[in-house]
Image (cartoon, rainbow, N blue to C red):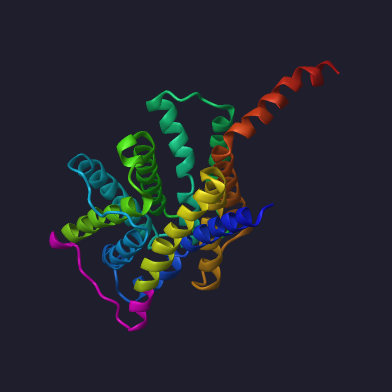
Amino acid sequence: MRLAEVKGYSLAAVAAAAYGTNPAFAVPLYEQGMNPCSVLLFRYVIGIPLLALLILFRGYSLRLSKEEIGPVAILGILMALSSLTLFESYRYMNSGIASTLLFVYPVIVAVLMIFFFHERFRATVAVCLLMMCCGLALLMKPQSGEPLSPYGCLLVMVSALTYALYIIMVNVSARIRAIPTAKLLFYVLVFGCSVYAVMILFGRPFTLPSVPSGWGSLVALAVIPTVLSLACTTKAIQIIGSTPTAILGALEPVSAVVLSVTLLGQSMTMRDVSGGALIVAATVLVIADKSVDRVILHVRKMFPRIRRR
């Protein structure tokens, strides 16, 4: 493996692990009296100037054309809703499990593309849907303790759906694909920030950290899972491509689970780990579906020979 490829895989791993730190910073802020809407507002407000500096450093213009404003605004609303429902779910369930459940979004993307954009239904999708259902069943019925909150699970599924819609819109819109990634995320944060501001203006409580360390958590939330993750992801895609980078995204829930157990003191059973592993494996198979399809079809063709023997 060349040195450049090692660097690319390392950056992709760092990006995924960094994004998985969301609950490690958000949950302590809840314990200080903050609510998800205020946490995300600060995350976006702090992240916006950092992204602006990153964009200017790369020599891009911050200007958007009139034709780009509408689609980017929709993306900002989708991202804001996805972030809000995920951060809300941390209040009702184990944040590591919530982050693992969110990882069903690539499977949702594959299913939506089949139904609404006439993509071919691949053998991989069927296998992955079965694996995902088995993983969800394991997570929903733990061996001990209270079952998962249905409301918390619903919030995560809404987060996964809205993020899947975000990805599809980016994928199918040539106008959006032409916008540099950092610049796109900058405006996604700008429009998403306005969603939280409107919610606060219409009655959602505005809260602040109760201790000085809370401000450090807010800055870390804006830097590590937002700007750092984006920068590493963008560079990794340039070096090794989007598919290997997406596969290494499986480290996101792993990072979230490890931090939830070690830093937040949340518990995980072997049943939880097994269910999460099935969901992550299903997602990785969907992302790498072309090679997997060939294997599945090859095995299926072998079945008649096996039966004749």
**Residue found at x 46% / y 25%:** 119
Q: Is residue 44 above or below residue 287?
A: below
Residue 126 position in % (x across, y down): 56, 30
Residue 34 position in % (x across, y down): 29, 71
Residue 177 position in % (x across, y down): 36, 40
**Residue found at x 23% / y 47%:** 73
- Res. 147 in view: no
Quarter of the image containing the C terminus? top right
**Residue found at x 44% / y 59%:** 231
Camera-side residue of 255 and 85: 255
Camera-side residue of 177 and 168: 177
Task: Name the chief secondary structure element in magenta.
Answer: loop
Instruction: Residue lying at the far bottom in this picture: please name it.
Output: 212
Q: Quadrant of residue 59?
A: bottom left
On screen, residue 197 versus residue 308, left or right, reads left
Camera-side residue of 245 and 237: 237
Instruction: Residue lying at the far front in this picture: please name it.
Output: 59
Q: Quadrant of residue 200?
A: bottom left
- Res. 291 in view: yes
211 within the magenta span: yes
50 within the magenta span: no
Residue 2 position in % (x across, y down): 67, 53
On screen, residue 254 versus residue 208, left or right, reads right
User: What is the magenta range?
Assistant: 200-217
Q: Is residue 34 above or below residue 226?
A: below
Q: Is residue 168 above or below residue 192?
A: above
Instruction: Residue lying at the far left in this picture: please name it.
Output: 202
